[in-house]
Amino acid sequence: MALRAEGLGYRRISQRLNDEGVLTPRGKKWFPSSVYSLIKKRRIRDARLNETPEYEFSDWNLHLLEKTFLPESGQGQVRQPG
C-alpha cells in the first residue's frame, strides 16, 4: 500500500515487485490485476476491523429438544420434553 500511496499505479507496482523478485502468495509473478485485488482485499479487511458492530437483541424463547435414537431403525426421533 505504500507504493500506491506514493502515487504508483497498479502496473508500475507489479513491475517493481517482479523486478525485485517478489512472488505472489502462490509463488507466481505479479500482474496489475493481482496488485489491485490484494489492495482491495486489504482495504476491505481494514474497514471490517475498524468498524464497531451494532448488536440488536430481541425477545426470544429457547426451547430445548430431547433427541432419542431408536436402536432398531437407526432413525432419530425428536420430541419436546414435558
Image (cartoon, rainbow, N blue to C red):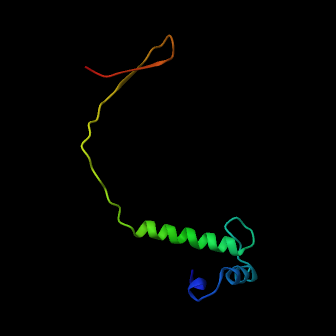
Please say if 7 is above or below 51.
below
Please say if 54 is above or below 9.
above
- Residue at the spot 58% in from the left edge and 73% down from the top edge: 39
User: Which residue in the rendered view is the most extreme toward the bottom?
Assistant: 6
Depth check, front residue: 48 or 19: 48
Q: With 13 as the anchor, is 58 left or right in this view?
A: left
- Residue at the spot 62% in from the left edge and 69% down from the top edge: 37
Q: With 27 as the anchor, is 75 left or right in this view?
A: left
Depth check, front residue: 26 or 55: 55
**Quadrant of residue 82 within the rendered picture:** top left
Q: With 5 as the anchor, is 24 left or right in this view?
A: right
- Residue at the spot 66% in from the left edge and 79% down from the top edge: 10
x and y, in percent, of residue 36 in the image? 63, 73
Which image quarter is the N terminus in?
A: bottom right
**Quadrant of residue 79 within the rendered picture:** top left
Q: With 66 as the anchor, is 37 left or right in this view?
A: right
User: Which residue in the rendered view is the most extreme toward the top?
Assistant: 72
- Residue at the spot 73% in from the left edge and 67% down from the top edge: 27
**Quadrant of residue 32 within the rendered picture:** bottom right
Count the labels in the image: 0
